[in-house]
């Protein structure tokens, strides 16, 4: 698919996120899950469906000579799946993916770590800890802080630090917590992220006062682009095989087809998702279609147009003559920065 006249979206996803389950044991104040869990259907992905998805994605990677990225999960806690190591090993044996999973760390027990080491699967582990004190960890995430520290100590002792990524949210942390976190991790080579922005996940979570990074976004009338460009390179698959828009679509408002009945490429290039992309990138009006993007802080319209991060194979460039007139005529977002024009 061409965006801005360039081949920006490949006919296959470079990255795939699979929700192998739908349950989470945390009660994070910045996550929609505690508020919307009763609205969602819950379950664990069937093994046969997971095999089909993994085999299909492996065929894409080998056919196109790319190293894919397979991750778990968008909103749930994957360590609650008893046979998580089996899921990861099946994918690892394909030999064409980087693999990681997101976790709050509360169930990342020594036995699970030992299994990854014994089976030599070594998935990358992205921990979302948010804060770093017993009282506030319990208040913000609703979990046992002492248990988390025990799991972290074992992980850091046994597991390659290059595969560990730990995220905090500085708007939630006190100065003492920042200092305590730096002290706890000072002798490690794990990557520490101190995030400054907190998303309301397309208005799907009601953030406590003062935490919203951009305020409550006004509903947009006509979209021009997505500042994250996730629909360009990543596919999200629910536990039942349903493909949905992106990690901001926490209520699963979109349905682009099911990979149980179709291949990943068939869904990725299907009419439903292509029509949605035309709306997101300003090629057509939404009509009755109301995507989550219309209430998402990362979507772009005439009122919040800004320099956007382009797809990995696209870099902003100067526009001259016919190209400039073509872009304006097509209705693409054109931005002026430091005296030069660039595509959004």
Image (cartoon, grey):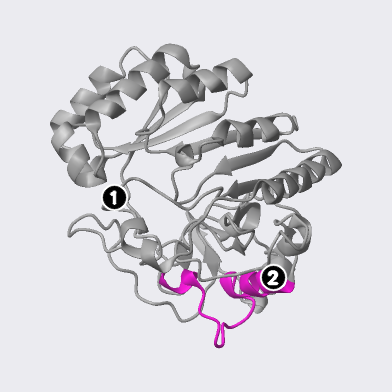
Percent position (x, y) of residue 121? Answer: 62, 24
338 left or right of 285 in image? left
Left or right, residue 284 beside residue 93:
left
Quadrant of res 270 = bottom right
**Residue that carries the numbered disc 2 in the rendered image:** 274
The vertical placement of 325 against 84, above or below, is below
290 is within the stretch colored magenta? yes
Judged by depth in the image, the label closer to the viewer, 1 or 2, is: 1
Image coords of residue 271 (percent x, y): 73, 73
Q: Position of residue 324 (x, y in %)?
A: 66, 68
Mark 1 element type: loop
Left/right placement of residue 13 relative to residue 279 reads right
Query: Magenta residues, as a range?
Result: 271-295
Q: Are marks 1 and 2 in contact (CB under 8 Å)?
A: no
Q: Badge 1 local density, few (<14 within 10 Å), some, or many (20+)?
A: some
Seen in the picture, residue 131 relative to 199 is either above or below; the reply is above
Q: Which residue is labeled 1 in the image?
A: 27
Marks 1 and 2 sit apart, C-alpha to C-alpha, by: 35 Å
């Amino acid at each position: 698919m061409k965006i801005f006249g360039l081949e920006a979206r490949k006919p296959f996803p470079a990255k795939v996120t699979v929700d192998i389950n739908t349950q989470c044991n945390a009660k994070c104040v910045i996550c929609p899950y505690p508020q919307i869990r009763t609205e969602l259907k819950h379950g664990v992905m069937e093994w046969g469906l997971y095999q089909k998805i993994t085999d299909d994605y492996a065929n894409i990677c080998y056919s196109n000579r790319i190293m894919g990225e397979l991750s778990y999960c968008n909103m749930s806690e994957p360590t609650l799946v008893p046979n998580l190591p089996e899921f990861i090993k099946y994918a690892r044996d394909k030999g064409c993916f980087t693999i990681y999973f997101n976790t709050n760390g509360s169930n990342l027990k020594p036995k699970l770590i030992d299994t990854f080491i014994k089976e030599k699967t070594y998935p990358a582990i992205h921990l979302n800890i948010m804060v770093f004190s017993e009282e506030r960890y319990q208040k913000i995430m609703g979990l046992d802080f002492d248990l988390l520290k025990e799991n972290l100590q074992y992980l850091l002792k046994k597991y390659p630090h290059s595969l560990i990524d730990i995220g905090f949210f500085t708007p939630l942390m006190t100065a003492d917590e920042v200092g305590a976190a730096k002290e706890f991790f000072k002798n490690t080579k794990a990557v520490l992220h101190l995030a400054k922005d907190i998303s309301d996940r397309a208005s799907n979570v009601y953030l406590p006062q003062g935490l919203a990074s951009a305020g409550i976004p006004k509903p947009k009338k006509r979209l021009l682009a997505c500042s994250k460009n996730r629909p360009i390179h990543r596919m999200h698959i629910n536990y039942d095989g349903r493909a949905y828009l992106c990690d901001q679509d926490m209520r699963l408002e979109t349905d682009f087809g099911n990979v149980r009945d179709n291949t990943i490429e068939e869904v990725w290039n299907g009419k439903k998702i292509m029509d949605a992309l035309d709306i997101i990138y300003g090629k057509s009006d939404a009509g009755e279609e109301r995507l989550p993007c219309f209430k998402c802080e990362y979507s772009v319209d005439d009122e919040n147009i800004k320099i956007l991060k382009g797809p990995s194979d696209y870099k902003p460039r100067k526009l001259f003559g016919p190209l400039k007139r073509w872009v304006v005529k097509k209705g693409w977002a054109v931005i002026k920065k430091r005296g030069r024009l660039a595509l959004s």
